[in-house]
Image (spheres, rainbow, N blue to C red):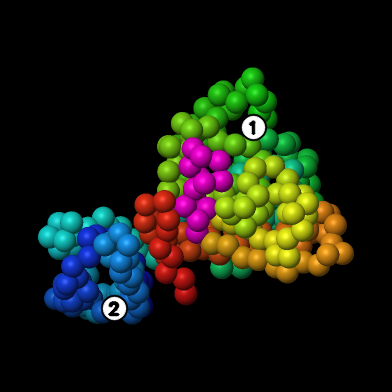
Amino acid sequence: MTARPFILTLSCGDRPGIVAAVATHLLDHGFNILDAQQFDDAETGRFFMRVVFISVRKQAGDHPRKAFGAIAERFGMSWTLASTEERQRVMLLVSRQDHCLVDLLYRWRIGELVMDVSAIVSNHPQETYKGIDLHEIAFHHLPVSRSTKLEQESALWELIRSTKTDLVVLARYMQVLSDGLAAKLAGRCINIHHSFLPGFKGAKPYHQAHQRGVKLIGATAHYVTGDLDEGPIIEQDVERIMHRDHPDDLVRKGRDIERRVLGRAVRYHLEHRVIMNGQKTVVFAD
């Protein structure tokens, strides 16, 4: 049976010898590197690395996590290590517009997004999505208003905990998370904003873009923080528009951008390609 790869990501203060130390360590413990990417951030003095490797031993030895602790301590690394057999549990939050939800479910069903869908949560009833094949995915209707936001978020957080959800995706979920919930989900909640941030934040960004007469519109996938639309950016894309386009045309074209940007961002996260770098990210795209 073919060995399944492991994925190591790390960051630390930049200094000579990190790559050599990691490669030598893996070799000495019976592992073979399949892919390696690295980045030196001259502005911050930080080093970032992603390594994919497999065991070449006939018999399984110690889990690589156990063996890597010493070298991580030596270089003061922040690091993660996961097997590609470990599927993350992903919760999808959605409001009335369902195009991102449909796209994510399609990518999941064809195997492009290797994950388990823990639940779909919406502030609208399930009948809103009667045209979508939700198969046997658990659906939760959590309505929310200004007066019930605290209770609704408490129920949402309990659902995240009880389903052992690893990642929350706001697939055009048109509710702003509170500072408290955003803090609890730091680094594991992705939002799609229908604008090329940092421009046109907040509501109706396509209408804002139309009023400014822009020639490009875009979408941004970012991690959620307590500051609205200010979280670390994972992925962006744009599309050219014409002076003839009306706001409805921008919305229509924007839906296509949103789908592909969010799909890539979720996949990058699931494949451990994203490493935090302060208010920014390092993304080792394929």
Disc 1 element: loop
Front position in the image: 113 or 171? 171
Q: In this view, does 208 lie to the left or right of 56?
A: right
Give the overall secondary structure of the magenta segment: loop
Q: Where is residue 124 in the image (x, y as percent from the top left)?
A: 72, 36
Front position in the image: 97 or 124? 97
In the image, the segment drawn in magenta is 222-234
User: Per the image, is 241 magenta?
Assistant: no
Q: Name the residue under label 1.
A: 142
| Three-letter amino acid code at the position of disc 2 | Ile
**Residue 16 visible to an observer of this rendering:** yes
Q: Is residue 64 left or right of residue 243?
A: left
Q: Is residue 123 left or right of residue 159?
A: right
| Three-letter amino acid code at the position of disc 1 | Leu
Dot 2, crowdedness within 10 Å: few (<14), some or many (≥20)?
A: some
Looking at marks 1 and 2 on the same chain, the residue that comes earlier in the sequence is marked by 2
